[in-house]
Image (cartoon, helix red, strand yellow):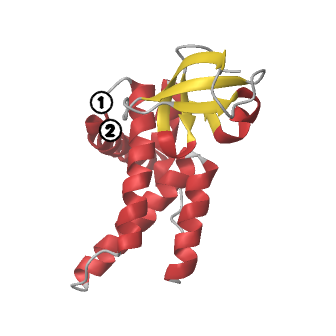
Amino acid sequence: MFGKGEFVVCGSKGVCTVEDVTKLSMPGVEGNREYYVLKPVYNYATTVYIPVDAGKESMRGVLSAAEAKKLIRGMGKIAPISIANDKLLEQEYRGCMRTNLCEEWVRILKTTYQRKKTRQEMGRKVTAVDAKYCRIAEDSLFGELAVALGISREEVPDYIQKEMKKNVSKDTKKLKKTT
């Protein structure tokens, strides 16, 4: 169970703060059922109500700073999605988003970035599906990493690049030592 003030990731709502855990007195709502009252961090005008007993499937705790750094260090090893058929690819994007896992969001981003680059080299525009899922995955991943690392969402891409460059440098030094 999550407590008041904790950060959670709640499906398509992204990172939220648990504002309260309470029973709701609203028409059509079961009176003895407890609900999480969530405020999305990046869309504070919205309030989300999730039944406590259903919360396990639809939300999880935000990564710790250590977990976020480990994810970033391992991004180079996460494989993009390897589906060529655009219809099947969209289904895979949807499935990846439903998992609510950062690693799956990274897979989407790697895939959409690669496809965008390839299409631009051929003089073509990025597909609407790729643009949509790239934006959703960036919002989800960058929002969670920002909260976990205590930085703004706008700083996350630069932070990732800097950390990945450090890892490449470390790997190069290790390789030189072993040869």
Give the residue number, with chain letter if any, for mark 1: 152
Give the residue number, with chain letter if any, for mark 2: 156
Tell me the residue at 29%/72% (across/down): 117
Observer able to see residue 83: no
Looking at the image, which is closer to me, 169 or 134?
A: 134
* Residue type at the position of mark 2: Val
* Label 1: element kind: loop
Tell me the residue at 46%/53% (across/down): 76
Name above or below for residue 60 compared with residue 89: above
Name above or below for residue 169 compared with residue 68: below
x and y percentages locating residue 164 in the rendered image: 37, 45
Tell me the residue at 37%/23% (across/down): 150
- The reply, left or right, for residue 160 in relation to residue 81 is left
* Neighbour tally class for label 2: few under 14, some 14-19, many 20 plus, Cα within 10 Å: many
x and y percentages locating residue 158 in the rendered image: 26, 41
Quarter where residue 132 is shown = bottom left
Looking at the image, which is closer to me, 177 or 74?
A: 74
- Check residue 112 in the rendering and tell me which mark sits there, or answer none: none
Observer able to see residue 166: yes
- The reply, left or right, for residue 32 in relation to residue 80 is right
How far is disc 2 from disc 1 in space, using C-alphas? 7 Å
* Residue type at the position of mark 1: Ser
Looking at the image, which is closer to me, 56 or 168?
A: 56
Looking at the image, which is closer to me, 81 or 33?
A: 33
